[in-house]
Structure formats: C-alpha cells, structure tokens
Amino acid sequence: MNINDALKINKNQITNLKLLLQKKVKKDIILSSGAKSLDKILGRGFKKGSIYLFFGANRTGKTQLCHQMCIQVFKQSSHKHSKKNAKYCLYYDTENTFRSERIEEISKLRQLNYNKVLNTILVSKIMSNYALLISLKSLEKEIKKNPIQLLIIDTINNYYRSEKGNPAISFSQLKNTFLSVLQKIYELTKTFNLITILTAQITPNFIEDAIIQEYPVGLHYLNHFFSEMFYLSHKNDVEKNLCYIHRVNSSFLPEKKLLYEITPKGLVDYKI
C-alpha cells in the first residue's frame, strides 16, 4: 500500500508541480465583463482556470452578471468556433432565475443576434445539492463535446441553506454532499481550464460597524476551495440603481472597491 492509499488521499487533490509551473508561464486568457470598472477590479477581466465567487443582497446584480457573461463569452468566442449549435456556457440555475427574455434584451442592446446567443447556453434547472453533484460528475462528456469556456452556478449555496431544515437529511450528509460539489467544481475548472462564476446567498455579519456587512452562507467551506471573492452591496442612492463591488479576497490582487450601475444593458460603468 502506497502513502496515498494509507492516508486516503484522492490523487485528484494532489497538485502536480510540473503542470502548475507550465500553467504559470502560459499567457493569461482574459474574458471581459463588458464594463471597464468590473474588468479593473477583476484584474483586467475573468481568467481561464479561475473560480470567482460573487455574494451580496438581492438586486445587487448577481444574476444580471451571470446573464451578461453568457453574452460576453458568445461575443468573444463565436468567431473562433465553426461548429453549429456549439455550447460555450453551462448555466446551473438553482433558484429558477435564468430568463431567456433578459438574454434577448441585453443581446439586442449590444447589437447581437439573440437566437444565436441563446443557442450557445446550456441551462440546467437544479432541484437539490445531490442533483447538482450528479450533474457535475457527468459534465466531462458535455465539455468534451462542446467548446465550453464558462461554467455558471447561480447560486452555489441555495440548497445547502434550505436543506439544513430538512429532517430527512442529516447534517453530515448535507455537509459531505456540499463539499463534494465544491471539490468537483474545483477539479473541472482546473482540468478543463474553465472560467467559473458562482453566486452565493448571504448571512448577516453581526460584528458592529463591519465593512463587510454580509458573508456567503457556508463561508468556512467555500474558503477551502475558492480565493477570488467579491462582495456586492447597494449604494444609498434613491435616484439611481448604483452598487459597489468590493474585492474582499484574491490570491493575486489587493482589496479594492468600485461603483457600478445596473441598467437594461446589464452591469455598466458608473459615469458622473
């Protein structure tokens, strides 16, 4: 018996230093958010092989960002692939918030063909944490069939939160399933060099006068797998739909906070 078997270590969890060094020397492949302010706080845009977690209150633009990025990946990738009906984006919807009409609205405002954009998005409605895990485990076949570049889960902790109150599910089972989901997301992102965007529901931070007033539910588990975290919050402005994006954690960038605006066109730069 080798040491990995003795310690019950999954070989997929062991970092291959040679592959890691090879990835470091590769030029970053960037996907723009479509807004200069967002790109700036992301470090020029979304990078392949990276996982981004966005958390914040309702109506701060989390789902709007997910819709917007489906369109952005089509805009940047459609000319690179000639395969008809190819899917560039996998969208896991756990809250029934995906809206094709919103894709249509943003696409038209950005002068893109709505039908072509929608045809590149593979949407899956998820009804439980276990269903999400099963779907993620079968994802490799779909990725191999299509030039998938973007994986979206909106939201990652919806069922972790709601299933806590289900007496038929033990906490140990709930925790293990959630951890398996997070591990699989990490493995898929690194193995297939995906851009992964996760949104998260929040819980209050009870520390008085805290700068970060909410934290994502299950933060102590999320922290083990993901480092790029962004807090979305409302600006006290009754006239405009203005919000802050706050980079609270990153493996390569310092803390930073910027304003953006939510419009029919999506998340855009705030202009005075």
Image (cartoon, rainbow, N blue to C red):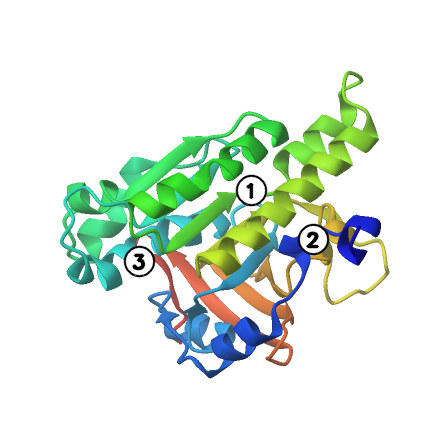
Q: As drawn, which residue projects farthest toward the front?
A: 1
Label 2 vs 1, first from the N-terminus: 1
Of residues 133 and 161, the one drawn nearer to the viewer in this rendering: 133
Query: Residue type at mark 3?
Result: Val
Label 2 vs 3, first from the N-terminus: 3
Q: Position of residue 267 (x, y in %)?
A: 39, 60
Task: Look at 81% across and 65% down and name the residue there.
Answer: 209
Taking the image as shown, residue 175 lies to the left or right of residue 230, namely right
The local crowd at label 2, few if under 14, some if 14 to 19, many if 20 or more residues have their Cα within 10 Å, is many
| Marks 3 and 1, how far apart at CA | 20 Å
Is 127 drawn above or below residue 211 in the view shown?
A: above
Taking the image as shown, residue 199 lies to the left or right of residue 110, namely right
Q: Which residue is mark 3?
A: 73
The local crowd at label 3, few if under 14, some if 14 to 19, many if 20 or more residues have their Cα within 10 Å, is many
Task: Look at 59% across and 43% down and name the residue there.
Answer: 156
| Marks 2 and 1, how far apart at CA | 13 Å
The answer to whether residue 246 is seen in the rendering is yes
Label 3 vs 1, first from the N-terminus: 3
Of residues 12 and 137, the one drawn nearer to the viewer in this rendering: 12
Query: Residue type at mark 1?
Result: Thr
Q: Which residue is mark 1?
A: 155
Q: Secondary structure at mark 3?
A: helix
Q: Secondary structure at mark 2?
A: helix
Q: Which residue is mark 2?
A: 222
